[in-house]
Image (cartoon, coloured by chain):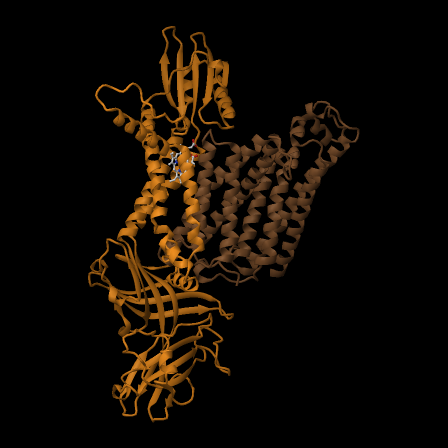
Chain colours: A brown, B orange
Amino acid sequence: MAALSDNLLIVTIMSYVVAMLLHAAEYSFGGRGVIAKAAAAPARELVGAGGPPVVEESPYAAPPAPAAPRRRINAELIGRAAAVVTAVGALAHVGTIATRALAAGRVPWGNMYEYVLAVTLLGVAVWLVTLWRNPQVRHLGLFVMLVEVLLVGVAGMVLYTPVGPLVPALDSYWFVVHIGAVATSSSLFLVGGAASAMYLVRSGYDAGKRGFLYAFGARLANAEAVERLSFRLHAFAFPIWTFGVTAGAIWAEAAWGRYWGWDPKEVWAFISWVVYAAYLHARATPSVKRSVTAWIAVLGFVTMLMNLFGVNIFFTGLHSYGGLD
Amino acid sequence: MSTDVDAPVETGRAGPPSGRTPRFVVAALVAARNAWRQLTSMRTALVLLFLLAVAAIPGSILPQYSVNREAVDRYRAAHPDLAPVLAKLWGFEVYSSPWFAAIYLLLFTSLIGCITPRLAEHARALRTPPPDAPRRLERLPHSAELAVADESAARAALKGWRTVRREQPDGTVTLAAEKGYLKEAGNLLFHSSLLVILVGVGIGAQWGWHANRLVVTGPDQAFCNTLQQYDDYGLGPQVGPGDLADFCLELTGFKADFRENGSPISFEATTQVTDAHGRDLGSRTFAVNHPLRLDGANVYLLGHGYAPVLRYTDAKGVTQQTVVPFPFTDATLTSQGVAMFPDANGGAKDAQLGFDGLYLPTRDKAPYAVSDFPLERSPVLVLTAYRGDLGLDAGITGSVYELDQRQIETGRLKRFGDAKLLRKGETWTLPDGSRLEFVGTRQWITVSIRHDPGEQIVLVGVILLLVGLPLSLYGRRRRVWLKLRPDGTAQAGGLPRTEYPGFEDEFASLVERWRR
Ligand code: HEM
């Protein structure tokens, strides 16, 4: 079982890499970006049905070079393929975690390796649901998959831990509740953060920036839609994160006798919480620019990453996850 | 309030100075009012939130007294130049520093200034019925023309809405309905709960205390909850030594379970407890994640190890017995410690006895340096004897876990015979004919004993917070109106007061029900 889990991990990473490359290919082959496609939605229907591309209805498609329509079909297909490969990767990902849970005979988030696998799986799940409900944001996939490949890759190569039992300190209901909530909210923050990053690129492009990265902006989804999506993901995640931190505090009270002790992990959980509270405030203040709000969201995710990697690796605290022994 | 905060702050020029109030008083009042507006603005809240996040960072990088005192001492020793400067800036106690407090106190002042007027406002809104329909409903973001047969059916569709019925002189009836008051209520609850938490944390800091202790099994090692009994402790400013709950505790047993690979499965301590009122509570167990909850304090299990029991009979035939907890150095409980007999040989300064010991709970082949398993399967004790002046009464309190190296270096304490390996029950005869018997071992545990009277308040605060937060984030305030004209036709209108995409569907389904 443990070996199967390790093999499935490789399938997972490979799928995510392929999905990422497909999303990247979609950028390079794509016609005039998602705005154009969204505007040309009826046309797209016809393309999907296999008929000749009807691009005349699109206000953006006015002077099509003879080859452009063909290339756009490719981009569309490539984009869909990316979503399918992502789903395949997610299945392998589920398999990786499930077989590991079976091998260990317990919940599969007992160390950093397993935790990162859980967060990234939830992240992909959040992403697929988002994609299902808002197909027009598919280009966000490149950002999400990039983060996924990096995180799953780091999990497999740096954090890998052989299957083992839980240490007594982790043997608690609160452990299940706490890590479950924190992992769920982290995955929502992951996709929300990616959406904010995408918003920054797109809105930067709209504002006339053309430098590195901003050039991609042309191919990205409508800035306002992505921004709203990002807000909804954050607003959904924040109470779950708050609950997760609270559950951690209750558990800490039972385990160490204090609900809050400013251990480095607790410090960074606090920092993330405050930054996300600032995000919600900024979002609700009309005079704060949306790009500033988006930067706060990206910063929030950076603090989450800091807690996950920085604190576990650089600082030693009470948390049994800590260290890479 | 998010809207009026962003209005420009008034300048210092007040209107025409009134006859009696001196000009500078007016100016001061205006300045104060502006400062208050500035402080309670959403922007200030944002800035303070950021400051709070940034201010929390150094405490995760620098070692903190409240987290790990020894780590601070090590850091200070390693950075003799930088450490004093950092200490002056409260770098080792960031979370109780004045600058950290300044930030959160300002933030909470801003919070109070922000929510008080909103509380009043919301209370007023709750008492005010939804306003009458605007004259031209078709100008609202959502509106529809329809035919409604029956007013009471129309009202039934508004179940759950706060509805007001008004009749116009021409016989037109308007229904004005509003929903989603819980959004603002949740927001206020959420922000107020932050204050509850702050109060709880403050009470805990002022009236709480904690202490740490090592306890060995056995009635002779029982202790009562007084400061003299503790290796280290911390009392809140409002706590005196007499305020500790007086219970007594004896460790009667300790059980640890390990897998074959040496990883722990469970730890459980059994104790005999007498509570603050002298009542015998009988045998109570506690474990990691399951503290012993007593009236006035909780006892937490932190660590455990072995304490060899040694009996020394000096050359004159005088016997002393001692139980010495050995700290462990690794996960298989390789343990190291010392046994000292300062009263040996009549207490003569040059004839005291000390033993340096290495205890291995499981080891049956050389080299006898590390234990193979944390449980006692074939325990051995390796001892080295020293004779001479232990240096105990030189006024310096030495470590109880190692011999005074200076005494050994200066030759006042000398190696006495060869090192010896002992199993339980074995006796070692030293060169002077004295004997040391390895009687057996006992278990020891380290416990943390804590009392935090603010804990329950914080918990209540957090629960309120968790209730208020989703209400605030997901609540939607909206109004609808239905104008029933005498001729049976009607007009409906809807206004979402917080933007949300689902209102269109909600309004459409309402209209649908009214139609029927
Ligand atoms: C102690 C620090 C504070 C924290 C952790 C905090 C946290 C939050 C959070 C998480 C929200 C989002 C909930 C929602 O959108 O309904 C929120 C909303 C809000 N906060 Fe705070 N807050 C703090 C202080 C303040 C202060 C000082 C003010 C006043 C200046 C304030 C005014 C508001 C307002 C008006 C909203 C509603 C925004 C909206 O229209 O949705 N908060 N706060």
Quadrant of the image occupied by residue B413: bottom left
Q: Residue furthest top?
A: B170
Q: Where's residue B194, x and y in %?
A: 35, 41
Displayed-image quarter of ligand 1: top left
Q: Where's residue A147, x and y in %?
A: 59, 46
Q: Is residue B315 left or right of residue B468?
A: left
Quadrant of the image occupied by residue B315: bottom left
Q: Is residue B386 above or below residue B166?
A: below
Q: Where's residue A274, x and y in %?
A: 43, 43
Q: Is residue B486 left or right of residue A231?
A: left
Q: Is residue B172 left or right of residue A92?
A: left
Q: Is residue A97 visible?
A: yes
Q: Is residue A165 above or below residue B466?
A: below
Residue placed most toward the observer, A159 or A86? A159
Quadrant of the image occupied by residue B431: bottom left
Q: Is residue A67 above or below residue B145?
A: below
Residue at 73%, 25% in the rendered image: A55
Q: Is residue A174 above or below residue B262?
A: above
Residue at 30%, 45% in the rendered image: B199
Q: Quadrant of the N terminus of chain B?
A: top left
